[in-house]
Image (cartoon, rainbow, N blue to C red):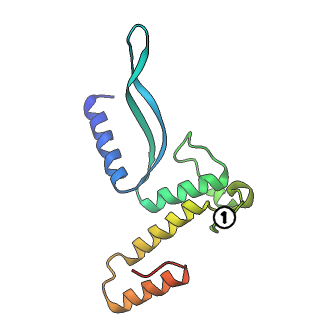
Amino acid sequence: MEAIQWGMLDYKTNKFLNQEQCHYIESECDKMVNFGFKKKCVRTRKEYCCYDQVITKVLAVGLKAQLNKGWDSCNDIEVDDLKNISFRECRVGEVPHINKCIPTDSYSEFKKVLFRQASKNVNSSIGDGLVNQVKQSMGQPNN
């Protein structure tokens, strides 16, 4: 890849990171320097799976856990996988891929993103009242 392409890739990744659209995968040493008596990592590269929307990232994280899929590929959830999933939150002690549930942290993020999306551009008192009712029904405090 050329430097311009790498720069654009870094730009896009940072843009997605700032908008909470990426899931961290791992870090690895990108550049090692040999000091003769010791090798030292002088640059670390972080790997992410980034998605076009926050809700897509949240669903991917939750569904991968439930389907027991690793992060070797960012986009390995297929249509056939959807028949084997549930959108309920895991209870204490439940394992997502065994009990067919979404991990609590992913579920909480999922609810937060849905509320954020639902309440976008809702400025009327009727809209605010509706948003507050939905929040109350899901156990969320009103702001």
Farthest bottom residue?
126
The correct choice, above or below, for 95 with respect to 129 in the image is: above
- Report which residue position mark 1 lands on: 90
Quadrant of image for the C terminus: bottom left
* Position of residue 127 measured from the top left corner of the image (x, y, whole percent): 38, 87
Looking at the picture, how far across and down is residue 10, in whole percent? 32, 40
Q: Nearer the viewer, residue 135 or 81?
A: 135
Q: Residue type at mark 1?
A: Cys
Q: Visible in this render: residue 78?
A: no
Residue lying at 42% horizontally and 76% vertically, measured from the top left: 118
Residue at position x 70%, y 61% in the image: 100
Using residue 10 as the reference point, say whether residue 137 is left or right of it.
right
Q: Residue at x 68, y 66 (%)?
A: 91
Report x, y in % for residue 109.
50, 64
Q: Nearer the viewer, residue 71 or 143?
A: 143
**Residue found at the far top of this picture:** 36
Query: Residue most toward the right?
Result: 98
Q: Is residue 84 visible?
A: yes
Q: Secondary structure at mark 1?
A: loop
